[in-house]
Image (cartoon, rainbow, N blue to C red):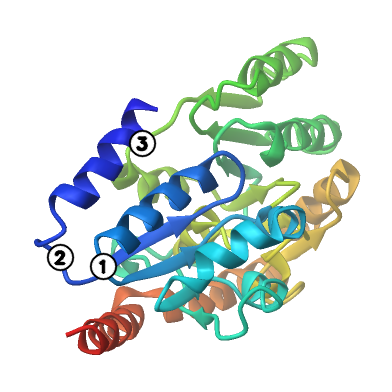
């Protein structure tokens, strides 16, 4: 609560130092923070833009429709980085603006996976909604046919016990030589971590448009992901990624086998993924943000 109080105090104390505020909105307990900040902005008579995040936000809006509608109603503009959230929250506010996540594309070295090796990487926080155990189960299924398969799992411990249970499962399955578990890495190190692998696994049970998947695509990794939330809007199955049902470790293992066995598939996925995320470069996204913020500032001048 101390951090929330500091945030609200800063919004109020520095109200003369900014023309427009941008508020990121997530579901769950984080929504309370957004409510407090937007209420403070309203009291300070400062205009704000709301940006919607998180694959669970539609479910949250269904449970708390009046709270979500009230928060969004006060914003001059509401943006979302995904078609998924735009389409599923139109009943709350029908003028949502699509502005994708942005990355510095030049920071991600593209390597054409013309012949993918069984070098895999998983990059998310260790939390139950990201289901890292599915990646471990996929490796269990791959080792009999791919004795050289190796998975690097990178992410911070979210504190819900998933990190420990994942490490325990790896040890119990005797996969210590096949799976390396690392903690979180600085953002600047993500491109080099991704560059060491050829296949990216995304195992989430709830998702929106994860930046980690966009980063993997930028590096040219062949992405295998669960088909949940906004993922099918980001990845076209068989074109720039392979999609599998949530929790289906057999399907994920089979997708990896296909990528390794079929160079034409790996090459096409790699090149199409990179082409797809060119629209996420800051050079394409920044003008859209500049236009939105200029319009909001002009309307409240």
Camera-nearest label, 1 or 3: 1
Whether residue 195 is situated above or below residue 72 in the rendered picture? above
Q: Residue at x 26, y 88 (%)?
A: 299
Residue 113 in view (yes/no): no
Indicate the quadrant containing the C terminus: top left, top right, bottom left or bottom right: bottom left
* Residue 289 position (above or below residue 170): below
- Residue 18, which numbered label? 2
**For this view, does 8 lie left or right of residue 220?**
left
Is there CB contact under 8 Å for labels 2 and 1? no
Whole-percent x, y for residue 166 in the image: 69, 21
Residue 187, can we see it?
yes
Q: Tell me if 219 is positioned left or right of 254 in this view.
A: left
Q: CA distance from mark 2 to mark 1?
A: 11 Å
Q: Residue at position x 63%, y 26% from top?
A: 179
Label 2: which secondary element: loop
| Pointer 3 residue | 4
Residue 259's x, y, as percent? 73, 59
Q: Position of residue 57 (x, y in %)?
A: 65, 56
Determine whether label 1 and label 3 are within 8 Å by CB.
Answer: no
Question: Residue shown at 29%/68% (left/top)?
Answer: 106
Name the foreground residue: 120 vs 165. 165
> Which label belongs to residue 138?
none
| Numbered disc 1: secondary structure | loop
Mark 2 or mark 1: which is in front?
A: 1
Above or below — where is 71 with respect to 197? below
* Quadrant into which the N terminus falls: top left
Decide if residue 111 is on the left or right side of residue 236.
left
Residue 7 percent coordinates (x, y): 28, 42
At x 67%, y 40%, the residue is 130
- Reading the image, the residue beneath label 1 is 45
Q: Mark 3 and mark 2: span between their CA atoms?
A: 19 Å
């Amino acid at each position: 609560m101390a951090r929330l109080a500091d945030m609200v105090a800063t919004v109020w104390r520095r109200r003369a130092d900014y023309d427009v505020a941008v508020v990121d909105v997530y579901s769950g307990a984080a929504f309370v923070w957004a409510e407090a900040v937007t209420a403070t902005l309203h009291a300070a008579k400062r205009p704000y833009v709301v940006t919607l995040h998180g694959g669970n936000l539609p479910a949250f809006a269904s449970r708390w429709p009046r709270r979500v509608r009230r928060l969004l109603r006060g914003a001059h503009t509401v943006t979302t980085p995904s078609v998924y959230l735009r389409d599923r929250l139109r009943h709350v506010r029908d003028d949502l603006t699509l502005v994708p996540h942005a990355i510095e594309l030049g920071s991600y070295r593209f390597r054409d996976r013309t012949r993918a090796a069984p070098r895999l990487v998983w990059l998310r926080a260790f939390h139950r909604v990201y289901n890292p155990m599915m990646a471990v189960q996929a490796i269990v299924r791959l080792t009999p046919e791919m004795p050289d398969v190796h998975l690097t799992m990178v992410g911070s411990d979210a504190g819900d016990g998933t990190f420990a249970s994942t490490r325990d499962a790896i040890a119990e399955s005797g996969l210590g030589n096949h799976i390396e578990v690392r903690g979180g890495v600085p953002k600047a190190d993500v491109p080099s971590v991704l560059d060491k692998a050829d296949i990216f696994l995304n195992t989430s049970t709830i998702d929106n448009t994860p930046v980690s998947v966009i980063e993997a695509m930028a590096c040219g990794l062949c992405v295998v992901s669960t088909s949940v939330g906004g993922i099918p809007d980001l990845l076209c199955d068989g074109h720039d990624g392979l999609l599998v049902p949530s929790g289906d470790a057999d399907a994920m293992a089979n997708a990896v086998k296909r990528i390794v066995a079929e160079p034409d598939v790996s090459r096409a996925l790699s090149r199409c993924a990179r082409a797809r995320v060119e629209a996420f470069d800051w050079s394409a996204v920044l003008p859209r943000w500049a236009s939105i913020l200029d319009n909001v500032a002009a309307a409240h001048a």
